[in-house]
Image: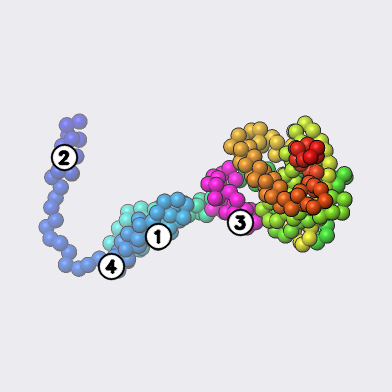
C-alpha cells in the first residue's frame, strides 16, 4: 500500500519536467478544434442551448481526432475523441427527438400564445388541455349550422379559432361570436354535470370557420382531476359570458322592451319580472 502511495506521489508531485518545449506549433486541426470547442461552451441553457453546445462540440472533438491521427499520431487521442463525437451525436439525436415530440400543431401553438401564454400557463398543462380535445381542429363551411335551437344536444364545449358565427333565436339576430371565443359557454354554464339539455339558439357560420371541441364528459373528468385547469376554464368561461352580455346591451335596453339571450337562465329570472 505504501508502494502505491509513493507511486502516486511521484506521478503527481514529482512529475518529470519538460526538458525543452517544441519549437514548432501543432497542426491547424488542433487550433481549429480548440476554437470550435471554445464556441461550444458559450451555449446557454434549455433545449436550444443544448443543441448549440453539442452542435459545436461534435465537430470540435472530430477535429481533435484528426489531429491525433494525422499530427500527434496517438491512437488513444484518436479513439477518445471519436468516442466523444459519438456521444455528442447521440445527444443531438435525443434532443431532436424531444424537440419534435414537444412540437404542437400551428393552430394550437397560436392558441397557446394568444390565450394561455399571457396567463403564464405552463406548456405541460396546456398539452393536457389539448390532449382532451384529441388535437383535432374541426371546420364549418359558410351557412352551416353548429347548433339548431331545440334540436342539438349540449354535449360538448367548443372554442372558435377562425371565422365568425352568428347567434340567432326564432330567426332574430342576437350577437356574433369571434375567434378565440367559446361557441357554447352559456350552455356549458347553464347545466350541471348530471343534467342534459338542448340549445335554445341557432349558431350559424357566416364565413368558413375552424374550431376545437371538448367532449362534455371527457372535459368534466379533466376538470375534476386537475383543479388548476378547472379554475382556468372557470375564468375563461366567465370572461367569455361577460363579453356576450356586453354585446347584448343594446338589445336588452331596446325601445319596445327587453331582448335577452335565453341561453342565460339567470338573466331571464332577473330581467323577466321587470
Quarter the N terminus occupies: top left
Q: Residue 106 in magenta?
A: yes
- Depth-wise, is mark 4 or mark 1 nearer the camera? 1
Mark 3 or mark 1: which comes first in sequence?
A: 1
Element type where label 4 sits in the image = loop
Q: CA distance from mark 4 to mark 3?
A: 51 Å
| Badge 4 or badge 1: first in the primary sequence | 4
Q: Is tag 1's residue or tag 2's residue first in the polypeptide sequence?
A: 2
Q: In front: 102, or 172?
A: 172
Give the residue at mark 4.
Answer: 27
Asked if disc 3 and disc 1 are in contact, CB closer than 8 Å, the reply is: no
Magenta stretch: dominant SS?
helix
**Neighbour class for label 1 at 10 Å: few (<14), some, many (≥20)?**
many
Q: Position of residue 17 (x, y in %)?
A: 13, 52
- Vertical arrangement, residue 24 with respect to residue 107, above or below: below
Q: Looking at the figure, which quarter contains the C terminus?
A: top right
Camera-near label (1 vs 2) is 1
Q: Which mark is residue 98?
A: none
Amino acid at each position: 500500500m505504501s508502494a502505491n502511495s509513493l507511486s502516486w506521489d511521484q506521478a503527481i508531485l514529482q512529475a518529470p519536467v519538460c526538458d525543452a518545449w517544441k519549437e514548432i506549433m501543432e497542426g491547424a486541426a488542433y487550433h481549429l478544434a480548440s476554437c470550435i470547442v471554445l464556441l461550444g461552451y458559450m451555449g446557454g441553457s434549455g433545449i436550444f442551448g443544448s443543441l448549440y453546445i453539442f452542435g459545436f462540440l461534435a465537430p470540435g472533438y472530430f477535429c481533435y481526432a484528426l489531429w491525433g491521427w494525422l499530427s500527434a499520431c496517438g491512437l488513444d487521442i484518436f479513439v477518445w475523441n471519436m468516442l466523444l463525437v459519438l456521444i455528442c451525436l447521440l445527444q443531438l439525436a435525443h434532443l431532436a427527438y424531444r424537440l419534435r415530440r414537444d412540437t404542437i400543431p400551428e393552430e394550437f401553438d397560436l392558441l397557446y400564445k394568444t390565450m394561455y401564454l399571457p396567463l403564464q400557463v405552463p406548456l405541460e398543462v396546456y398539452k393536457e388541455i389539448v390532449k382532451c380535445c384529441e388535437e383535432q381542429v374541426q371546420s364549418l363551411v359558410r351557412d352551416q349550422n353548429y347548433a339548431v335551437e331545440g334540436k342539438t344536444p349540449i354535449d360538448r364545449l367548443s372554442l372558435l379559432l377562425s371565422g365568425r358565427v352568428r347567434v340567432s333565436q326564432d330567426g332574430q339576430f342576437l350577437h356574433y361570436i369571434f375567434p378565440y371565443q367559446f361557441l357554447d359557454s352559456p350552455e356549458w354554464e347553464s347545466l350541471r354535470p348530471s343534467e342534459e339539455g338542448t340549445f335554445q339558439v341557432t349558431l350559424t357560420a357566416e364565413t368558413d370557420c375552424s374550431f376545437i371541441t371538448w367532449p362534455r364528459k371527457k372535459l368534466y373528468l379533466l376538470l375534476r382531476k386537475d383543479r388548476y385547469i378547472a379554475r382556468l376554464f372557470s375564468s375563461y368561461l366567465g370572461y367569455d359570458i361577460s363579453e356576450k352580455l356586453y354585446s347584448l346591451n343594446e338589445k336588452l335596453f331596446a325601445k319596445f322592451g327587453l331582448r335577452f339571450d335565453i341561453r342565460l337562465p339567470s338573466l331571464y329570472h332577473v330581467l323577466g319580472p321587470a
